[in-house]
Image (cartoon, rainbow, N blue to C red):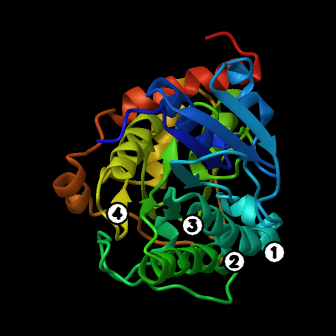
Amino acid sequence: MRAYHRPRTLITGGAGFLGSHLCDRLLAEGHEVICMDNFITGSPDNIAHLFGHPRFHFIQHDVTNFIYVEGPLDFILHFASPASPEDYLRYPIQTLKVGALGTHKALGLAKAKGARFLLASTSEVYGDPLVHPQPETYWGNVNPIGLRGVYDEAKRFAEAMTMAYHRYHGLDTRIVRIFNTYGPRMRLDDGRALPNFMRQALTGEPITVYGDGRQTRSFCYVDDMVEGIYRLLLSTEVEPVNLGNPDEIPLLQLALEIKELTGSASPIVFKPLPADDPRVRQPDISKARRVLGWEPKVSRREGLERTLAYFRQKLGLAC
């Protein structure tokens, strides 16, 4: 039996919203954590509290270039990528490159180190789904040349490459399909509906709803998501697993809930729906329940209140 050693883990995109929470969790679990980020959408603020921690290391690097990490690695979590429509529309080529070249470089490192590799994929691989809710067996309805295709197809390619490395090289791999996640450390200018609604409500701006607001999303609080990812990392499940909250809500209802929670007088205004915007989004998490024993625990109201407290702090508003 091999003597216990402290796990050594690389997290690409570790200064991002989800990546930084994973740094916290893995440090709490006793890992030595190497965080890698080029700050294209991540922020030093998300990991500032970790500098000086004896088991935390930071490397500023673009993972589309060759990745060098000295010493052994047990786990690689590949979370480097723009993740909001505003970001990947601003950085379309970078998004494609990190999904393709970045995933290739990270997989190559995992092969060289004999590390378990976990890919952060997305519900966007399902596109504008014709099956509802979306199980992992659904192949999706994606416009490869549409504006959102740069993200959707980058992640679909990343999944294909991850499975190719698993089948051809015998690499130990995991794939998580992440549905809408929210919580502290989201950027105020993230561009997605929930942070937009919160920022607008807290600053008194009009709350912008696209289309008629009847399109749905399912929002998972970040602590629940991190728990699911950690369980998947330690599991033996190789094929993709959906993680998200199946509590589906129309975006207009979400805007009204945030308006009520903040006591905001902001009016709700409607703007045209962006191209290829999915009409529905709801995870089928029966596989996560069965394989990981996981389901979300934090209610939407509690999660929204925690996130609002963070946004108020960032905006310099009294709680």
Q: Earlier in the sequence, mark 1 or mark 2?
A: 1
Q: Nearer the viewer, residue 221 or 4?
A: 4
Q: Amino acid at mark 1?
A: Ile
Q: Amino acid at mark 2?
A: Val
User: Mark 1 to mark 3: distance in Å?
Assistant: 26 Å
Left or right placement of residue 282 versus residue 269 in this view: left
Q: Position of residue 298 (x, y in %)?
A: 33, 32
Q: Nearer the viewer, mark 1 or mark 3?
A: 3
Question: Which residue sits at x=51%, y=64%?
Answer: 121
Q: Decide: marks 1, 2 in contact (CB < 8 A)?
A: yes
Q: Nearer the viewer, mark 4 or mark 2?
A: 4
Q: Amino acid at mark 4?
A: Val
Residue at which label 1 appears? 93
- Whether 75 is drawn above or below 162: the answer is above
Question: Which residue sits at x=53%, y=85%?
Answer: 142
Q: Earlier in the sequence, mark 4 or mark 1?
A: 1
Left or right placement of residue 62 versus residue 132 in this view: right
Quarter of the image where the N terminus is located? top left
Q: Nearer the viewer, mark 4 or mark 3?
A: 3
Residue at which label 3 appears? 111
Under circle 3, the secondary element is helix
Quadrant of residue 4 within the rendered picture: top left
User: Mark 4 to mark 3: distance in Å?
Assistant: 22 Å
Q: Earlier in the sequence, mark 1 or mark 3?
A: 1
Q: Nearer the viewer, residue 268 or 314?
A: 314
